[in-house]
Image (cartoon, rainbow, N blue to C red):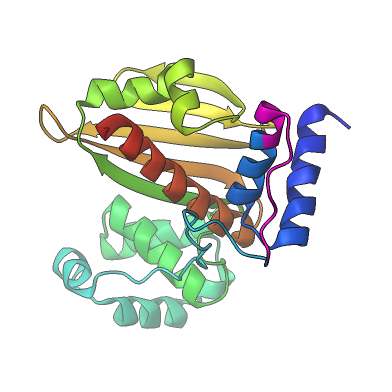
Amino acid sequence: MTRQKSFKSGVRARMDKTGESYTAARRRLLEKAVTGRQQPEPDVPAAAPADPPAEPVQAQKLPDGALRERTGRGQDEWFSLLDAWGGTRHTHTEIARWLVEQHQVDGWWSQSITVAYEQARGMRAPGQKSDGYFSAGVTKTIAVPVDRLFQAFAETELREQWLPGATLSVRTATAPKSFRADWEDGSTRIVVTFLSKGETKALVALSHDKLTEAESAARMKAHWRDRLSALKSFLED
C-alpha cells in the first residue's frame, strides 16, 4: 500500500470513529503530522463547524420560462414528446440529436433537456454525466483581481495556504483563464476556470470530475465549498 493510500485509509478510519466529515478528519491527521502531537479528540462524534454538510445532488430542473422562450416548449411538454418517441430506449447522443434534427433545438438546450429527461426517467442519477461518472461543481466570487486568483491555484506556495496537504499533478495552467490538474491518486481531476468581474473582483468556477459515486460527488462538493471559502478568506484578508 502506498503512503497516499495508507493516509486515505487513516482518514476513513477516523471518519468511522468520530463521525467527522472527510475534510475535518483529513485536517486533523495533517495537524498531527505537522505538529507531531496528538490533537484532542471531540467528546461526541461531530463534524467540524467549518465543514458544510454533504448535500445530496438534486435532479436537474430546467427554468421553464427560459426553456419555453428558447425552444417553444416547457420541460413537461418536452418530456411528453420524448416519451411518445420512446426516449428511454435511446442513448444520450441519440436523444440530443433527435431534439436538434427533428425540433431544431440548439445544442446547449438539447443537452440540457436530455440530461433532465434522463434523470427524471431514472436513466441517469442526479449529477451523473453521460460517461457514467459524477461531477461536483462549486463557484465563488472573491474580491481580488483575476490574476491573483489564478496565482492562488497555479503557485504551489500560495495554494498550500488554503489547500494544505493536497496532492495535485498539474495538467495545464493558462493564465489567467483556466487550471486543470489530476487530484491525489490521479483517478479524478479538477477543472477550474476564472472570470474577471472588474479590476478588484473575480469569479472562480471549479468542477471535480471523474467521480465514481453520487456520495463522492456530494462529499467533494462540500469539501470544495469549504476550501473556496478558505481561499476567499486567505486572499481577501
Q: In the image, is 39 to the left or to the right of 108?
A: right
- 127 or 197: nearer the eye? 197
Residue 81 sits above or below residue 162 on the image: below
The answer to which image quadrant residue 111 occupies is bottom left
Pick the front one: 222 or 124: 222
Residue 213 percent coordinates (x, y): 65, 57
Vertical order, 189 against 220 (above or below): above
Residue 230 x/y as whole percent: 40, 40
In percent of width and height, residue 151 lies at 35, 20
Give me the residue at 32% from left, 38% from top: 232
Q: Nearer the viewer, residue 159 or 44?
A: 44
Toward which corner of the image does residue 152 lie, by quadrant? top left
Q: Is residue 184 left or right of residue 230?
A: right
Q: How far across and down, in percent of the image, does residue 77 sit?
A: 30, 81
Q: Is residue 131 visible to us here? A: no
Q: Residue at x 25, y 60 (%)?
A: 104
Q: What span is in magenta?
A: 32-43
In the rendered structure, the answer to whether residue 33 lies left or right of residue 172 reads right
Which residue is painted at 59% across and 44% down in the image?
Answer: 210
Quarter of the image with the C terminus in it: top left
* 13, 192: nearer the viewer: 13
Considering every residue shown, the one lying at the far right of the view is: 1
Residue 225 highlighted magenta (yes or no): no
Whether residue 159 is visible to the viewer of this picture, yes or no, is: yes
- Residue 33 covered by magenta stretch: yes
What type of secondary structure mainly makes up the magenta span? Answer: loop
Quadrant including the N terminus? top right
Count of picture labels? 0
Q: Is residue 233 above or below residue 139?
A: above
Q: Is residue 113 above or below residue 221?
A: below
Q: Tell me if 161 is positioned left or right of 6 in this view.
A: left
